[in-house]
Image: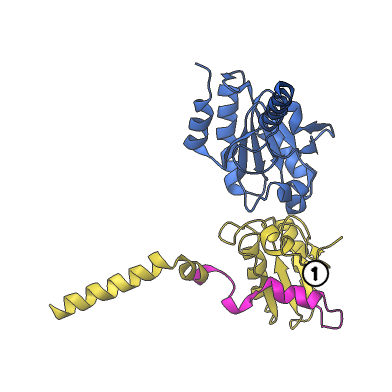
Amino acid sequence: MKIVALAFALLFMSLWSTTLSAQPTGLELGNKSPEIKLSTTKGDTIPLSALKGKMVLIDFWGTWCAPCVEEQSELARLYKKYKLASFTNGKGFEIYGVALEAKKLNWENFIAKNKITWIQVSDLKFWRSPVAKAYNIRELPFNVLIDGKGVILAKNLHGKDLEKEIGKYLRK
Amino acid sequence: MKTKILTFLLFAFTTSLFVTNPFSAQAQNDPWTPQQLLAPADLAKVLNNPKAPQPIVYSIGMQAIVKGSVDIGPTMRAENLNTLKDKLSKLPKSSQIVVYCGCCPFSRCPNVRPAMALLKSMQFTNYKLLNLPQNVKVDWIDKGYPMSE
């Protein structure tokens, strides 16, 4: 009898730990964000999962999108301020810029002109990008804030709301 | 007194037109009429029917996504608008023409107005703007309408 009880306890614990470690992949808060594997302007592939351990803002944008362009200076400020910060759920802050771009030259020129230093990737497929489908993007700008485990903390926050959300997780 | 009330009511009514219906105010400045907006479903139906007379479809935005469309490039840039002008100058004024961008809603799109104004100024008589109120992803790709290879 004791053996049966022990077996049940072990089974329960194993199921419980599986539930804890594997958040479902999806787009809801608390889900693990879908993987993105796109190339930089130099052709190097940087997967989103390579940023594990850091707080990451996935910024979907395009050089043709006026509000996205306007937002870049604010992102530069946030990046400078929080890049080396420690968070309760990650160490350091990174921005993973996903450009829904069609022409490489426009994208490259914008990055150079605006001295963007955070990660920039694109498949140059504009609105046909599979990533736009995977993240169910309906308009730009759009962003997703994830923690060090890739879990979605917030979606589509901008300006003061975005900084407030990042600030919530700062290690005091 | 009656005149004052009538004046006030007239003022309130006119103001409400602009406050509650920004689209009608917007439409007054746009170089197209509501009749010139072509529903995506209607264009898709024509493109899917090879026996139907096919319009000439110009992409005047970032990428030619609609099947068979000619990539002009964003017509907010003078060189692309000139390319469109060159192509149009070789066509009869009665040609069936459709233009689209689809980067973003019309209110924010920098490309649709120069292209539609050009068609108007060149006195074409049968041209339409593909009605993509949100963008080409939501209003064309997500609906499964025919796309270029």
For this view, does B124 lie left or right of residue A28? right
Helix, strand or loop status at disc 1: helix
Residue A172: percent from the left, percent from the top? Answer: 49, 16
Q: Residue at x 69, y 77 (%)?
A: B127
Q: Residue at x 47, y 71 (%)?
A: B24
Residue, far top: A172
Chain A, hue in figure = blue
Query: Disc 1 marks which amino acid?
Result: Lys
Q: Is residue B143 above or below residue B62?
A: below
Q: Is residue A27 above or below residue A3?
A: below
Q: In this orientation, which residue lies closer to the viewer: A131 or B31?
A: A131
**Badge 1 local density, few (<14 within 10 Å), some, or many (20+)?**
few
Tell me if I can see residue B102 in this picture: no
In the image, the segment drawn in magenta is B28-54
Could you say which chain is coloured yellow in the image? B
Tell me if I can see residue A29 in this picture: yes
Give the residue number, with chain letter if any, for mark 1.
B87
